[in-house]
């Protein structure tokens, strides 16, 4: 007291005032937040699905600077409701059909909460043995559920790791493949390496190639066609690889997609892998969206050929009841990842790592620090069980089938590409538009009209869909997968589409 220093020496005062980890305050405030979220889920259907705010909306509602003094959680939650919720696009709404789903669940949420609650930083085994060991076990369980070849499992010399997102999984496997190849042909050959995907491959591959130092002129987005349902064919791949070899380049990496983002197209995995094997090309199988459904035996054949791939990943945070972020990646040769990604600074040295008794997941990913992600996946698997997870996925496929059936009964509409999973790509037909506009270019008129229709529907806030352009055709994508969606929502969605189409078709 009295000394000027004392007014800054807040040791005890801090603990007394904000109590950052006081158990009873945690209990009280935590319950308030859970209640808040329970009410959110109860009322989520009342909000416009796509947020209707204008850019910069929040700045107008917020103070210029952070508060100097503490504010109570009750007041903060009131502001979340008043200011934040309007700026949220409600991915958990049953009327959400945009992009791909982000299917939340109680188990996923609670697992996330446990993980955040322990708040460990699990870079290596020693930093929290349970985090590493549970992750390996859960990835083994999941690999078996997907009937992945044993070479991808720890029990067969491979192994699984949880990454944040597919972008990271592709980057990590690409640098593993790159370094493995450069070790063979010499590090000064980087500019000869070629990366392959199709024109439907997710932009994650291009980003990974950019980061990995692949020359932009050696990035191949091989053209797909409507005849092959926009899947990459082995013939097209072989032809491209052949011409690259003739030019003195070195084919390195193929990202094959099972369930593309635009239209859920499926690349011809088996024959693609055979071509890749001939030329020593690393194959990564990206099943970010569709991967979950391969726990259902009736879909598993679409993954045939994976036994000849090098790595496989899918996002449990898309269609598997697990909260963002949770990308599941398996590799046949973990040492390729480790050689490209490991560092071993003095402060991390420990006996378990040194004696090679443990996995240090920091060497399987980009970042050093890592979250305890396996808890949420473990809770999802245990809380629901394989049977219910299958039912959940099949339920969505059935709802998408129903939607397709409804489209089939209205001659103004058409399904543009075959539905493979629970996503339907459809549009108003050019014939219908031309009846209205008598435009010269039917396809162009159809594209413009369908874009206008989609915006008109989304503006209503009743449902939310997004679009894709596939082979020059603008389609609306109806991606079923939100955890709260039931058949009645799908029927309602179809009514919303029909009514908006009728209004727009009748407009002068
Ligand atoms: C969603 C998606 C991605 C990107 O996933 P992130 O986890 O957001 O990086 C990549 N590939 C496919 C096929 C996807 O559907």
Image (cartoon, helix red, strand yellow):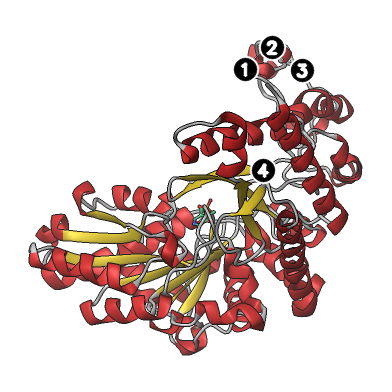
Horizontal side of residue 310 vs 163, given as left or right? left
* Residue 475 versus residue 231 in the image, above or below: above
Q: Which of pointers 1 and 3 lies earlier in the amino acid sequence? A: 1
The quadrant where residue 233 appears? bottom left
Horizontal side of residue 23 vs 222, given as left or right? right
User: Which residue is label 2 attached to?
Assistant: 60
Query: In the rendered structure, are the residues bearing label 1 and label 3 in contact, judged by CB atoms less than 8 Å apart?
Result: no
Horizontal side of residue 27 vs 463, given as left or right? right
Question: In the image, what residue occupies the spot 71% across and 40% down?
Answer: 464
Foreground tag (1 vs 3): 1
Dot 4: few (<14), some (14–19), or many (≥20) neighbours within 10 Å? many
Q: Which of pointers 1 and 4 lies earlier in the amino acid sequence? A: 1
Camera sees residue 99: no
Query: In the rendered structure, are the residues bearing label 1 and label 2 in contact, judged by CB atoms less than 8 Å apart?
Result: yes
Query: In the rendered structure, are the residues bearing label 3 and label 4 in contact, judged by CB atoms less than 8 Å apart?
Result: no
- Residue 505: x percent and y percent? 69, 32
Foreground tag (4 vs 2): 4
Q: Nearer the viewer, residue 117 or 161?
A: 161
- Residue 457: x percent and y percent? 71, 34
Q: Nearer the viewer, residue 298 or 121?
A: 298
Question: In the image, what residue occupies the spot 10% across and 58% down?
Answer: 188
Query: In the rendered structure, are the residues bearing label 3 and label 2 in contact, judged by CB atoms less than 8 Å apart?
Result: no
User: Which residue is label 4 attached to?
Assistant: 465
* Residue 185 versus residue 57 in the image, above or below: below
Foreground tag (3 vs 4): 4
The quadrant where residue 9 appears? top right
- Residue 363: x percent and y percent? 41, 64
User: Which residue is label 1 attached to?
Assistant: 56
**For the residues marked 3 and 2, what is the alpha-carbon distance in whole angstroms?**
21 Å
Q: Nearer the viewer, residue 55 or 212?
A: 55
Say what secondary structure mark 4 lies in: loop
């Amino acid at each position: 007291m009295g000394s000027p220093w004392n007014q800054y020496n807040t040791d005890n005062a801090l603990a007394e005032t904000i109590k950052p980890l006081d158990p009873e305050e945690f209990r009280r405030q935590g319950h308030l937040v859970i209640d808040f979220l329970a009410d959110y889920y109860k009322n989520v259907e009342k909000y416009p699905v796509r947020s209707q705010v204008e850019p910069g909306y929040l700045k107008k509602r917020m103070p210029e600077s952070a508060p100097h003094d503490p504010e109570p959680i009750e007041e903060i939650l009131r502001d979340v409701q008043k200011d934040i919720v309007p700026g949220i696009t409600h991915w958990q709404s049953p009327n959400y059909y945009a992009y791909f789903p982000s299917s939340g669940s109680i188990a996923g949420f609670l697992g996330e909460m446990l993980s955040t609650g322990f708040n460990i930083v699990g870079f290596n085994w020693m930093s929290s043995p349970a985090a590493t060991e549970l992750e390996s076990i859960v990835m083994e369980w999941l690999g078996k559920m997907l009937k992945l070849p044993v070479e991808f499992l720890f029990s067969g010399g491979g192994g699984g790791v949880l990454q944040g997102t597919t972008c990271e999984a592709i980057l990590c496997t690409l640098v593993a493949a790159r370094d493995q190849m450069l070790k063979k042909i010499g590090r000064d050959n980087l500019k000869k390496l070629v990366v392959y995907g199709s024109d439907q491959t997710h932009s994650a591959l291009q980003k990974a190639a950019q980061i990995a130092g692949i020359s932009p002129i050696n990035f191949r987005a091989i053209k797909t066609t409507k005849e092959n349902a926009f899947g990459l064919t082995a013939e097209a791949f072989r032809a491209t690889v052949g011409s690259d070899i003739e030019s003195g380049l070195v084919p390195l990496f193929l990202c094959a997609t099972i369930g593309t983002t635009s239209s859920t197209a499926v690349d011809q995995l088996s024959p693609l892998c055979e071509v890749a094997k001939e030329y020593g090309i690393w194959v990564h199988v990206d099943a970010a969206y569709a991967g979950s459904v391969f726990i259902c035996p009736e879909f598993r054949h679409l993954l045939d050929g994976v036994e000849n791939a090098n790595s496989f990943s899918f996002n449990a945070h898309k269609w598997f009841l697990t909260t963002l972020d949770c990308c599941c990646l398996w590799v046949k040769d973990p040492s390729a990842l480790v050689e490209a990604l490991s560092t071993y600074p003095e402060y991390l040295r420990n006996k378990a790592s040194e004696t090679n008794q443990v996995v240090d997941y920091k060497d399987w990913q980009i970042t050093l620090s890592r979250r305890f992600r396996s808890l949420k996946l473990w809770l999802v698997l245990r809380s629901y069980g394989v049977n219910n997870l299958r039912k959940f996925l099949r339920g969505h496929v059935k709802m998408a089938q129903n939607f397709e059936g409804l489209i089939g009964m209205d001659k103004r509409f058409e399904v543009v590409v075959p539905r493979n999973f629970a996503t339907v790509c459809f549009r108003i037909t050019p014939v219908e538009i031309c009846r209205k506009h008598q435009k010269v270019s039917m396809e162009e008129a159809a594209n413009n009209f369908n874009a206008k229709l989609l915006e008109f529907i989304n503006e209503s806030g009743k449902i939310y869909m997004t679009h894709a352009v596939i082979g020059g055709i603008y389609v609306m994508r109806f991606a079923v997968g939100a955890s709260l969606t039931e058949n009645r929502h799908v029927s309602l969605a179809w009514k919303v589409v029909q009514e908006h189409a009728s209004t727009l078709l009748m407009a002068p």
